[in-house]
Image (tube, helix red, strand yellow):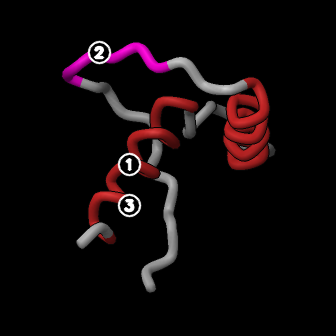
Amino acid sequence: MDKFVMKKSSDANIYKSIRFPTEVNDKINSIVNKANEGKAKKEYSFNGFVISACEFALKHMK
């Protein structure tokens, strides 16, 4: 199976509002913060993570 790779932040062309459970929200924020550690400019975002995760899931659904 492919490895999940979080893409860098990008502009989205469709806006959707999603409510996440606190635990999921906190875990995603932790991953994004870790990915941005030591970088002069923030490269990864919550939105980028969610888009990458959705693309990964859709690619592997059959």
Q: Amino acid at mark 3?
A: Phe
Q: Main secondary structure of the magenta part?
A: loop
Q: Are marks 1 and 3 in contact (CB under 8 Å)?
A: yes
Name which quarter of the figure residue 57 lies in: bottom left
Residue extending farthest bottom: 1
Quadrant for the N terminus in the image: bottom left
Residue at the spot x=38%, y=61% of the render?
Answer: 56
Q: Are marks 2 and 3 in contact (CB under 8 Å)?
A: no
Q: Which residue is mark 3?
A: 56
Depicted 60 relative to depicted 8: above or below: below
For marks 2 and 1, the one nearer the N-term is: 2
Q: Amino acid at mark 2?
A: Tyr
Q: Which residue is mark 1?
A: 54
Q: Which residue is mark 2?
A: 15
Name which quarter of the figure residue 43 lies in: top right
Give how far across and how far down residue 45 sits, in percent.
Answer: 56, 32
Residue at the spot x=46%, y=20% of the render?
Answer: 18
Q: Amino acid at mark 1?
A: Cys
* Left or right side of 45 for 38: right
Please say whether residue 14 is one of the residues in the magenta stretch.
yes
Please say whether residue 16 is one of the residues in the magenta stretch.
yes
Give how far apart the Cα atoms at labels 2 and 1 are. Answer: 15 Å
Is disc 3 placed on a helix, strand or loop? helix
